[in-house]
Image: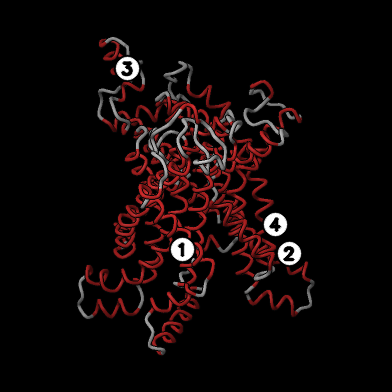
Amino acid sequence: MSTAAEAELAIQAKATLAKGQGYWAGVFKRVRRDPVTLVCFGILLIMFLAILFAPLLAPHDPYQGSMIRRLRGLQTAGYPLGTDELGRDMVTRLLYGGRLSWFMGIVPVVLAFFIGTTLGVTAGYMGGKVNMLIMRTTDVFYAFPSVLLAVAISGALGAGIVNAILALTLVFIPQIIRVAETVTQGVRNLDFVDAARSSGASGFTIVRVHVLGNVLGPIFVYATNLISVCMILASGLSFLGLGTKPPEPEWGLMLNTLRTAIYVQPWVAVLPGACIFVTSICFNLLSDGLRQAMDVKG
Amino acid sequence: MILYLIRRALYAIPIALAVGFVCFMLVQIAPGDPINAIVPPDAPGDVVEQVRRDYGLDKPLPVQFGLWLFKVVQGDLGRSLATGRSVWSDLSTAIGNTLMLACCASLVGFIMGCTLGGLAGTFRGTLLDRFATGIAVAGVSVPHYWLGMVMVVIFSVQLNWLPAMGAGPGGSSDWAWDWEHFQFLVLPTITLSVIPTGIVTRTVRGIIAEIMNQEFVVALRGKGLTTFQIFLHVVKNAAPNALAVIGLQLGYLMGGSILVETVFSWPGTGLLLNSAIFQRDLPVLQGTILVLAMFFVALNLIVDLIQAALDPRIKRA
């Protein structure tokens, strides 16, 4: 199957070369024709800008509550999405909450991307004992369901943003190592790498010039998919009280504190979760779109 | 064949040991002296020293791990700081509850996933395929703890059809197989099953689609077999890989049900973990994680063995 796929890739590569187009121009063109990916990208861009400019957009103070206007419903005058259990404006809290949720959803994946790619490419390229050491260690972390591992590490370390990010990074590193190792092994034995080796290039140069360019794409696509998972896990940790601490706004934590309000204002209480869902599904679909546009297998 | 099975089973031993080591290290990485995980904070100094010697905490780390491991294989997971009971006594009932929830959710996910994935893989590109793929994407990207809350809002708060939390009438956790108790299982099961539904749908669709593209299917059609007969051949080829994914889902659900159990106050390992985290009851935390992880290791092994037994191509690899 892999040889057929490689042949197909080679034909496609030749076709794009013949047209005088670069690889990225082709990817861009395919993304532009994919409405789902474009819509998801648009939604994410709007959300990103909204949380980035939260201080300008937010109508109220995110920490200033009031006992007399607790738990107002949707479409209350001045508070279009109601107020939370301490009387704080939900629009403001959701805007500010997105900052921490996005931060905790993306940072662990970025960290894991760098560490995991380094280790995975090293394991895949070097082979032998190095590969054995790195991959067997990875197997151990794979023996834990990811939610359990995240809860275990941050539960032992104690609540806090840094601990949660540390725990999530540790959860994702093994997953990225596996992908990086597999694609690197696929590239390592291709002819152009042999050619570079026979021309006297050092191992480091070969990896930098010839291997990385061919493996970063698939790893990147996999990592964008992980953001979707990381968003859910990070907010989940906060939901359990293991991530952010009150009164800091964060979608998972807001969902947790509003849980007591589901009998009073059910639709206000579930709003933060809807934000997590929309972000997560958009990253997921974006990742699928990129996978297709970049023609990554698996 | 036998050789492969033995080799795979032997490989599980170092993994299990390493998993044990990670669980052992959980208490070590926790901030503060690990002795605080055993004695209450207000204990006098000489008692603390006594306990430290008794538990071997004055010895080097590898020796400590050995001693800990020796106790764990005998089934001694230590005592809870909060209740003073042995960790295993609380854990054994909790595991039963979690296992029941996870099995029900896996079953629902398995049936839904195979149906949707099978249909989507067979009728690729149709509206049905899009619908199934949409469900699959939503299933893997929904924060299930939130979905649980939405379910409670709809079915408990608004419609008042099903109970919102607990595992039995009046807050009791004694299970019985009647509707009184069964209704408590409905919402958590549906909530927890969205993840396996999404993943199984995606996987089965991919597997079926790949098999349908193979030449032997064209050959079967050329031979004049009916669609149903071809379908049986496809199922036979898809089963080993599909089973592997489905089997592992049970393990993921065992470990991942903590959030759903928190939402529904389901008296399982998740709720136990949750309270252990809040009371900083490290022996309970460690014991629960260890048992769940070991369950996952064992499940991994069983899935691999079954897969090898079903698919003779594997043992050659």
For marks 1 and 3, give the CA distance. Answer: 60 Å
Of the numbered discs 4 and 2, the one sitting upstream in the chain is 4
Q: Are marks 2 and 1 in contact (CB under 8 Å)?
A: no
What residue sits right under mark 4 in the picture? B115
Q: What residue is at 64 percent from the left and 77 percent from the top?
A: B215
Check the picture and name the quadrant holding the N terminus of chain B. Answer: bottom right
Instruction: Point out which mark residue A41 bears.
Output: 1
Q: Quadrant of residue B314?
A: bottom right
Residue type at mark 4 is Thr
Of circles 3 and 2, which is in front?
2
Q: Earlier in the sequence, mark 4 or mark 3?
A: 3
Q: Nearer the viewer, residue A126 or A164?
A: A164
Task: Tell whether label 3 touches label 4 (CB within 8 Å).
Answer: no
Residue B89 in picture, x, y percent from top left: 53, 22
Q: CA distance from mark 4 to mark 3?
A: 57 Å
Q: Is residue B137 left or right of residue A175?
A: right
Residue B72 position, x and y percent, is 43, 28
Q: Which mark is residue A176?
A: none
User: Residue beneath label 2, please?
Assistant: B232
- Closer to viewer: mark 1 or mark 4: 1
